[in-house]
């Protein structure tokens, strides 16, 4: 099982790299394409599609780190452990391990026979990968809905309805989301099997194969599909801009503007909250209000408020490392490709 799983994990790592590459490429291309950022699924502050893709790059790059770490522990040879008490024969265990492609040996014969941590670690890693894919899928389901329309999924990842001809259902991301429960269940199955086993071997351990094999098949297929789904989707920047305007996501920038002029942030926050009510009634953006109305809230507001309320200005001002400023996103997407080469070089 160790040798098989070690080879299969390399394939999983190749797929994870491919997905991370896809996010990095899209991030570079869409570094300045505006998108509302959300908290509680409520419009919060402006970001970009590029910044959002890089968040997923970070998530899946951590999956690479975890899987690599597990791969190292998987490639330890138990051969020579015997039934539990080692072997009386003059066996060079290190030489045998090297010949078979292991990196090291298990240092205790009881542990060599009893250990299934490598399988549990793999299943945990698989569960986290599927959780990340599920979160991505959920956002794509939401973003592609008629209520959002931020993206359009390729027809190959959707189906129609047998009754309602106007429907374009996001079947593939929904299926990816659903597969997460299956892989989580496999982890719980083996954890439960191993929870009360005394050392060394018990027949219960035969139950390690099915969860591992099933999870491998599931995550390999899911990652391959996710790569093509993300690569082929089309964004609707005009719809995203409209959502930014309707959501008053630059209200925090008004509070920051007043705070920089010396007003306590608590008071600035209160004024910004009142300001949002004005364009809400008129169905316009905060930045479209007349200066006189804004000054009615505070005499500290001047002509420069309109630059502060600009979506592009809001983005460009957030230049701290990890922020959504387009120049940051471009630099981070370029760095992401270099980090990938260090994490898991492309297979030849």
Image (cartoon, rainbow, N blue to C red):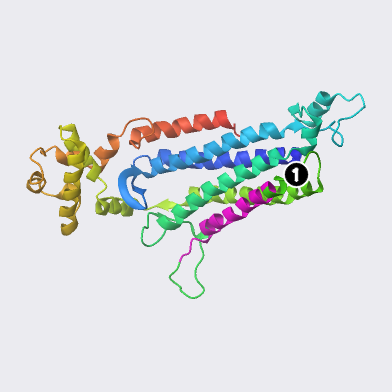
Furthest residue toward right: 89
Asked if residue 230 lies in the magenta stretch, the reply is no
Residue at the (17%, 54%) spot, across then down: 277
Q: Is residue 85 above or below residue 167?
A: above
Question: On the rendered structure, is 199 left or right of 282?
Answer: right
Residue at the (61%, 39%) spot, across then down: 14
Quadrant where the C terminus lies?
top right
> Does the rendering let one see residue 348?
no
Question: On the rendered structure, is 145 left or right of 83?
Answer: left
From the top left corner, tell me how far across and down residue 4 is, in percent: 75, 41
Categorize mark 1 by other alpha carbons within 10 Å: few (<14), some (14-19), many (20+): some
Quadrant where the N terminus lies?
top right
Asked if residue 183 lies in the magenta stretch, the reply is yes
Residue at the (79%, 26%) spot, across then down: 98
User: Dividing the picture into quarters, in which one does residue 311 lie?
Assistant: top left
Q: 110 or 329, which lies in front? A: 110
Point out the stretch of residues depicted in magenta. Answer: 168-191
Q: Which residue is mark 1?
A: 197
Q: 22 or 201, which lies in front? A: 201
From the top left corner, tell me how far across and down residue 330 is, in percent: 39, 34
Q: Is residue 344 above or below residue 136?
A: above
User: Dividing the picture into quarters, in which one does residue 242 lie?
Assistant: bottom left
Question: On the rendered structure, is 85 left or right of 320?
Answer: right
Main SS category, magenta section: helix
User: Dividing the picture into quarters, in which one does residue 343 lie?
Assistant: top right
From the top left corner, tell me how far across and down residue 42 is, in percent: 33, 52
């Amino acid at each position: 099982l160790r040798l098989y799983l070690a080879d299969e994990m390399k394939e999983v790592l190749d797929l994870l790299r491919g997905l991370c590459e896809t996010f990095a490429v899209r991030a570079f291309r869409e570094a300045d394409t505006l998108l509302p950022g959300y908290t509680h699924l409520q419009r919060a502050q402006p970001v970009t599609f590029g910044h959002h893709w890089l968040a997923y790059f970070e998530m899946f790059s951590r999956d690479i780190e975890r899987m690599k770490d597990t791969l190292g522990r998987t490639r330890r040879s138990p051969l020579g452990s015997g039934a539990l008490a080692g072997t009386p024969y003059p066996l060079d265990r290190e030489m045998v391990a090297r010949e078979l492609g292991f990196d090291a040996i298990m240092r205790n014969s009881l542990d060599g026979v009893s250990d299934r941590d490598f399988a549990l670690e793999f299943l945990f890693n698989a569960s986290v990968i599927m959780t990340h894919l599920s979160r991505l899928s959920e956002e794509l389901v939401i973003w592609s809905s008629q209520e959002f329309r931020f993206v359009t999924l390729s027809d190959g990842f959707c189906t129609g309805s047998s009754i309602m001809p106007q429907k374009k259902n996001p079947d593939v991301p929904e299926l990816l989301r659903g597969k997460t429960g299956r892989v989580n269940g496999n982890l719980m199955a083996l954890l439960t099997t191993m929870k009360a086993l005394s050392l060394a071997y018990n027949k219960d351990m035969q139950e390690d194969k099915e969860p591992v094999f099933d999870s491998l098949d599931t995550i390999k297929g899911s990652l391959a599909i996710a790569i093509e789904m993300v690569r082929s989707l089309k964004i609707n920047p005009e719809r995203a801009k409209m959502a930014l305007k309707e959501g008053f996501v630059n209200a925090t920038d008004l509070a920051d503007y007043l705070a920089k002029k010396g007003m306590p942030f608590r008071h600035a926050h209160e004024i910004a909250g009142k300001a949002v009510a004005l364009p809400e009634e008129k169905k316009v953006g905060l930045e479209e209000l007349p200066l006189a109305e804004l000054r009615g809230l505070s005499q500290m507001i001047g002509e420069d408020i309109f630059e502060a309320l600009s979506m592009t200005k809001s983005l460009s001002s957030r230049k701290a490392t990890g922020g959504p400023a387009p120049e940051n996103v471009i630099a981070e997407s370029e760095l992401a490709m270099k980090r990938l080469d260090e994490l898991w070089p492309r297979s030849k």
